[in-house]
Amino acid sequence: MSRSLRVLHLEDDPDFAKLVQELLRKEGWQTHPVVVDNHRDFVTTLEKNAFDVILGDYQLPSGSGLQALHVARQKAPNTPFVLVSGILSEEAAVETLKSGATDFVLKSSISRLVPAVQRALRETGARRQAQDN
């Protein structure tokens, strides 16, 4: 049984974006990805659509993952945001978490992505349930 998952993915490498969607699909999600490769399209897409999870590349030619994170916290504060990076220093990782990222995953450890998304969705569901009670 597949679960539906609406994903906004800020990523400038189409092959990596496909890999991520395949990993999620193998875990039983029927993904509905929207992949954007620049900050402007990210903002526009986020303003017009609701997502279950946001994945954001840390380094992009048109802006940073931190910029995207700040926009996401303003426009979709309850949507989990997982930062994905090829290189992320310990200081940058701490800064992303302090800024509201749900988690971060190194591209070299892509096997951590699915567990990070699963945890982010569980935590968001638990928060929503606690707010409803």
Image (spheres, grey):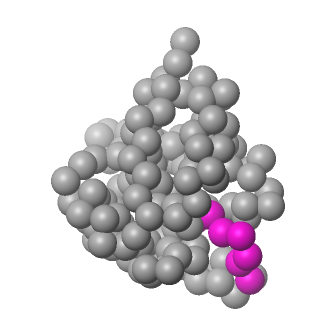
At x 43%, y 52%, the residue is 35
From which residue to which does the magenta span run? 83-89
**Residue 63 drawn above or below residue 57:** below
Q: Quadrant of the C terminus?
A: top left
- Residue 112 x %, y %: 74, 50
- The one of 112 and 12 positioned closer to us in this rendering: 12
Residue pushed farthest left?
48
Q: Quadrant of the N terminus?
A: top right
Answer left or right for 10 relative to 116: left
Determine which quarter of the picture holds residue 104.
bottom right
Determine which quarter of the picture holds residue 128.
top left
Residue pushed farthest top?
1
Q: Is residue 124 magenta?
A: no
- Residue 74 x %, y %: 28, 71
- Residue 2 x %, y %: 52, 18
Q: Is residue 81 visible?
A: no
Residue pushed farthest bottom?
91
Q: Is residue 114 visible?
A: yes
- The one of 49 and 52 positioned closer to us in this rendering: 49
At x 80%, y 61%, the residue is 108
**Residue 114 drawn above or below residue 75:** above
At x 54%, y 28%, the residue is 29
- Residue 61 x %, y %: 50, 80
